[in-house]
Amino acid sequence: MAARTPALESFPPLRAWQRKALVEYLRRRSEDFTAVATPGAGKTTFALRIAAELLADGTVEAVTVVAPTEHLKTQWAESAARVGIQLDAAFRNADLHSSADFHGAVVTYAQVGMAPHVHRRRTMTRRTLVILDEIHHAGDSRTWGDGVKAAFEPAVRRLMLTGTPFRSDDNPIPFVSYERGEDGLLRSRADSVYGYSDALREGVVRPVLFLAYSGETRWRTNAGEELAARLGEPMTQDLVAQAWRTALDPAGDWMPQVLRAADARLSVLREAGMPDAGGLVIATDQQAARSYAKLIEQVTGEKAAVVLSDDVGASARIATFAASEQRWLVAVRMVSEGVDIPRLAVGVYATSASTPLYFAQAIGRFVRARRPGETASVFLPSVPHLLGLASEMETERDHVLGKPKDREGFDDDLLERAQRDEQASGELEKRFAALSATAELDQVIFDGASFGTAAQAGTPEEEEYLGLPGLLTADQVAALLSKRQAEQLAAQRRRAAERQSEASAPVAAPPAPMSAAQRRVALRRQLNALVAARHHRTGQPHGKIHAELRRLCGGPPSAQATIEQLEERIATVQTL
């Protein structure tokens, strides 16, 4: 018995971007359509609505969904079944054809790469719509890319979906259109784009606060030399990488202090209107993940769920956590992309994987909004590269072919080895032994701006930021952070005045000159205030104003900017 045609009236109401993209798709009726939408925006619902439309009008007879992981196969099949589209998530290459009970099947990119001829034959047998979820994965290897192209060239329609339409290499993404720009480089072109800033403005995703923690780190090299560095201070890439790894060492004090702060933030969210709010720790490798789970139990008194790899039982553990009220989940990569756990609201970025693609995928796990006012908080090391990515959350990227590549991030090979179940000791650990690390809140990044001054872990100053209300709009978050920062600076000035008044010198000493760190904090505060004022005058988002200042003045995001760069931006925004 053939599967029934899905009823369009059974679909939930579409969001504005979904309706607009659907109209554009139906108007064009072209073979290929690429939709870029920020994580949490509803790409799955959009794609299934297109599938239902094409099945209903007879354009296609079958649907094939290609997903990155086994877990996402199950997730796609369950979502499709809720709207009357039956997809076989258990299909294997040896099956050759799906049962007539199904409208089609869900497979992985790896599955297609292993036997493209099987999927090409299936595609040619019936008029097929192919939905390529997170299409950038088709460029992961020549086998995957060539396999996808060979298997699905005969498809009547191809719908490409992604929340991160860029890669760090020159592997072209199959079926994606590229256009040559004025600089001569080829850039990917999307037919529909719905970015994070659009979704944030419409309340589709949550505002994300990044709480960056610095601290003193100390380690010993293989030559026996002891080195110390403050996380977040300018230094060579090698020293940054070693200080970063030292901070993430489960045996040090940095991770326990950050996990304690993250759990305190989770409690605030649970008490303020998100009673089931959950937290996710993203670890570099399996050994670290197990150690972090033990730390969480010591800090909170509750066990954490642990998902180590895309193996048998991992999907069930994720589903169990998603449906429970358990506080913490620890994962290596299983939850970095596509997995839908809407209650995740607090994250700890405890991995050395730091390419823009991976960072965007990881942060995407926390942005899915369920009700107005929900916010997300992500704790991360105060590393310049990560601070830049956090400040550029709203930046829309394309895949560029032929552009000279700079090294982006550190130690991503560690994570890849962990995925292959190898020992994740790595070359970096062989070069040094972590000795100690302490944590302190360095700054809070929101909407491209940096707020706050250094606050030791466990102090009232830190608690002021950890205790921010859990239900806030984006504008309320920015206003409250500005207020907190002003109060923090005022308190520092009062303490300095009290110390000066207690001095017994007959002549009052002139105010001590500000250190470079204090000067930067004061300039960041002044810049944020001016940007906020322009936001209220023009209605432009804070992030777009900061991006425009960077375009005009050059330099990195304000979280990393030098004193001179901040002064130039202040002068510039005053003339806009």
Image (cartoon, rainbow, N blue to C red):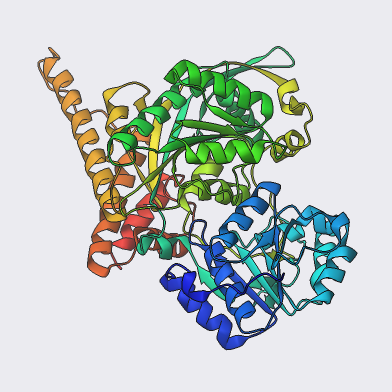
- What residue is drawn where x is 50% and y is 62%? 42
Q: Measured along the vertical axis of the image, is residue 137 above or below residue 62?
A: above
Image coordinates of residue 565 in percent, x first then y, are 42, 51
Q: Quadrant of residue 486?
A: top left
Q: Measured along the vertical axis of the image, is residue 187 above or below residue 258?
A: below
- What residue is drawn where x is 84% and y is 63%? 147
Q: Quadrant of residue 536?
A: bottom left
Q: How many marks?
A: 0
* Quadrant placement of the C terminus: bottom left
In this rendering, would 195 be left or right of 65?
left
Inspect this view and state whether residue 426 appears. Answer: yes
Nearest the camera: 123 or 198?
A: 123
Q: Residue furthest front?
A: 1
* Quadrant placement of the N terminus: bottom right
Q: Measured along the vertical axis of the image, is residue 356 above or below residue 97?
A: above
Image coordinates of residue 307 in percent, x first then y, are 62, 33
Q: Quadrant of residue 504?
A: top left
Nearest the camera: 325 or 391?
A: 325
Q: Residue furthest bottom?
A: 27
Inspect this view and state whether residue 382 appears. Answer: no
In this rendering, would 154 be left or right of 441?
right
Image coordinates of residue 484 in percent, x first then y, are 24, 39
Q: Measured along the vertical axis of the image, is residue 70 above or below residue 267?
A: below
Image coordinates of residue 138 in percent, x first then y, are 75, 60
- What residue is drawn where x is 38% and y is 40%? 444
